Image: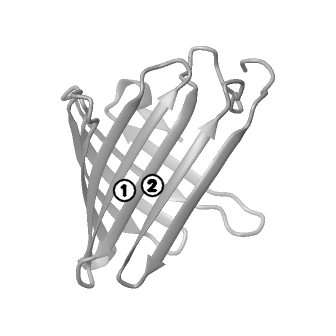
Amino acid sequence: GGGESQGGRYLLGFERTTPRGGGAIQWEHFDAGYRPLAWRPQEVRPRDQLTAGAGIPLGRRVAVSVNYVRQTSWNGPPFETASALLTTTLPGGFSLSAYLGDSLAGRGMTGGLSLTRALGVRSSFSAQTARTEDGRRTSSIGATRSPPVGPGWGWRVRASNTPTQRFAA
């Protein structure tokens, strides 16, 4: 790690959910001496972060949400992102999501599609494809089984065309 942690992390948030939609806003502040667990010296250290989001159902099978994040740091440039997500349920237990995001700093847009299917209560299968800010396309496929509430095991396996994440288990 990067030495001992000194300094605090402070969080204030509000959330409201109703059958007609919901929203949340959260502010975090990190003291100059704060170091997260397993922090490495070359990592950007956040200073303040504001996160806001809202979502509404559009009928029985479709939901839309928008999100905004602004972060300043102690040792790096600030950034802002905005994104929108549209999710719909499909026949056969599938769920399809599409998202579009913008860094708000002129670095380019991101976007992607994700297809997910539940395989019982704790297991799922998913496939994703996305376009990064620099125009690269990434794709992955995987399966997950969450651990039970009590003792037990879970697992995850994933394959991707991203060079640093070809296979994960």
Location of residue 110 with respect to 141 vertically, above or below: above
Is 163 placed left or right of 130 in the picture? right
Q: How far apart are marks 2 and 1 (CA)?
A: 6 Å
Residue, x 46% and y 63% (percent of image)? 24
State the image quarter where residue 136 is shown: top left
- Provide residue 58's location: percent of width, then percent of height: 23, 78
Q: How crowded is mark 2: few (under 14 residues within 10 Å), some or many (20 or more)?
A: some
Say whether disc 2 or disc 1 marks the residue closer to the N-terminus.
1
Give the residue at mark 2.
143
Is 47 placed left or right of 91 in the picture? right
Location of residue 124 with respect to 43 vertically, above or below: below
Residue, x 71% and y 69% (percent of image)? 149
- Number of the label disc, if any, that sits on residue 60: none
Is 72 placed left or right of 99 in the picture? right
State the image quarter where residue 96 is shown: bottom left
Which one is in front, 99 or 156?
99
- Provide residue 28's location: percent of width, then percent of height: 58, 44
Location of residue 145 with respect to 74 vertically, above or below: below
Tag count in the figure? 2
Which one is in front, 114 or 20?
20
Which one is in front, 64 or 137?
64
- Residue type of the residue flagged with mark 1: Ser
- Provide residue 119's location: percent of width, then percent of height: 44, 70
- Provide residue 46's location: percent of width, then percent of height: 55, 30
Q: Which quarter shows the C terminus?
A: top right
Residue, x 72% and y 18% (percent of image)? 2
Q: Which residue is most to the top?
A: 42
Marks 2 and 1: CB-CB under 8 Å? yes
Q: How crowded is mark 1: few (under 14 residues within 10 Å), some or many (20 or more)?
A: some
Give the residue at mark 1.
126
- Residue type of the residue flagged with mark 2: Ala
